[in-house]
Amino acid sequence: MKVDVLTLFPDMFSAVMSESMMWKARDRGLLDFRARDIRDFAQDKHRQVDDSPYGGGGGMILKPDVLVRAIESVKGDADTPVILLSPQGRKLTHAVAAELSRLPRLILVCGRYEGVDERVRDLAISDEISIGDYVLTGGELAAMVLIDAVVRLIPGVLGAEGAQHRDSHADGLLEGPHYTRPPEFRGMGVPDVLTSGHHADVERWRRQGALKRTWQRRPDLLASAELSDEDRAYLAGLEAGKAD
Ligand code: ADE
C-alpha cells in the first residue's frame, strides 16, 4: 500500500513511522509511506498556507489554492481516495480500517487550525474520517492512528506473530484476558484450562472470556456481533447470574 500524507508538520510522523510494526511494514515492502509538507505547495513569497475566515469569528482556515494544489500534485490522475482527518468525519472503526486496508493507495489530508476551506471538500476530498468525538489540535495524530489501524491488517505485516482474527472488534467483541509466564505472580495463578493442552477447551474459554468482557464493558456491541447458539446460551447464563 502506498500512503501519502499531506501535513504542515511532516516531522511529527518520523518516530511513529520508523519504529515497530510500521517500520517492519515499510522494511518488508508492504508500505510505501511519504509525509509531504503542504507549505511546499504555497506559491507566494511568505509561503502562506492559511488565512482568516470570511465573516470573521477568529481562527485560521487552510487556503484552498494551496491545499488543492498539494492534493492534485500527489494524486496525479489516479482514482485514489483522498481522506480528510477531521472531527466531522465518519467514525474510524475496525470495519472502516478493514475496508481501507484492501486499497492499494491512500492520500490523507491533515487539517489544522479551524479547518479547511469548504471548497477543498467539494473539489478534492472523497472521504472524511474522525478518530473519536473529541477535538485534536490537528489531523496528524489522527492520521497516525488511522495508518496504524489499517496497515496492521495488511496481510504479511504482523507475520506469524499476528493474531488479528482475535483482536478486539475484529469479530464485533472485545478480547478476553491473556496470561504468560510466570505461572504464579504475587499469589495469583493462571486458569488451569490454559495449561491443559485441550485446544477446544482453550478456544471455548477464550470465546467466553471475550463474550463476558464485552457484556461487562461494551454491551452495546453485542447487538451487532455474530453470535452462535452456544454464545447466546452463555450470555443468557451471565444475565441470569448463573455463568461466570
Ligand atoms: N482533527 C481534529 N480532531 C480530530 C478527530 N477527532 N479525528 C480526526 N481528525 C481530527
Image (cartoon, rainbow, N blue to C red):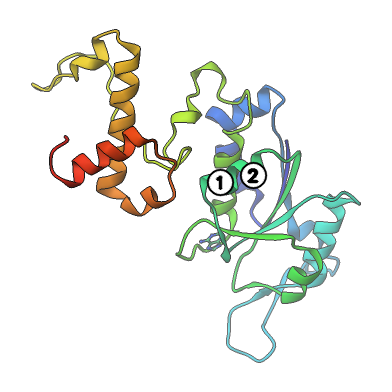
Q: CA distance from mark 1 to mark 2?
A: 6 Å
Q: Which mark is residue 28?
A: none
Mark 2 sits on what residue? 99
Q: Is residue 113 left or right of residue 196?
A: right
Task: Looking at this view, name the residue that lies furthest to the top.
Answer: 197
Q: Position of residue 43 (x, y in %)?
A: 86, 66
Q: Position of residue 84 (x, y in %)?
A: 67, 60
- SS category of the residue bearing label 2: helix
Which quarter shows the N terminus? top right
- SS category of the residue bearing label 1: helix
Residue type at mark 1: give it: Ala
Task: Looking at this view, name the residue that lies furthest to the bottom.
Answer: 55
Q: Position of residue 191 (x, y in %)?
A: 19, 20
- Regarding residue 176, the answer to whether it shows in the image is no
Q: Residue at x 37, y 40 (%)?
A: 174
Q: Are marks 1 and 2 in contact (CB under 8 Å)?
A: yes
- Local packing at callout 1 (Cα closer than 10 Å; few below 14, some 14-19, many 20+) is few
Q: Is residue 203 left or right of residue 186?
A: right
82 or 64: nearer the viewer: 82
- Regarding residue 131, the answer to whether it shows in the image is yes
- Give the quarter of the image for residue 99: top right
Residue type at mark 2: give it: Glu
Q: Residue at x 67, y 28 (%)?
A: 26
Image quadrant of ligand 1 equals bottom right
Q: Position of residue 36 (x, y in %)?
A: 74, 49
Up/down of 179 relative to 9, above or below: above
Q: Residue at x 55, y 41 (%)?
A: 149
Q: Residue at x 52, y 64 (%)?
A: 137
Mark 1 sits on what residue? 95
Which quarter shows the C terminus? top left
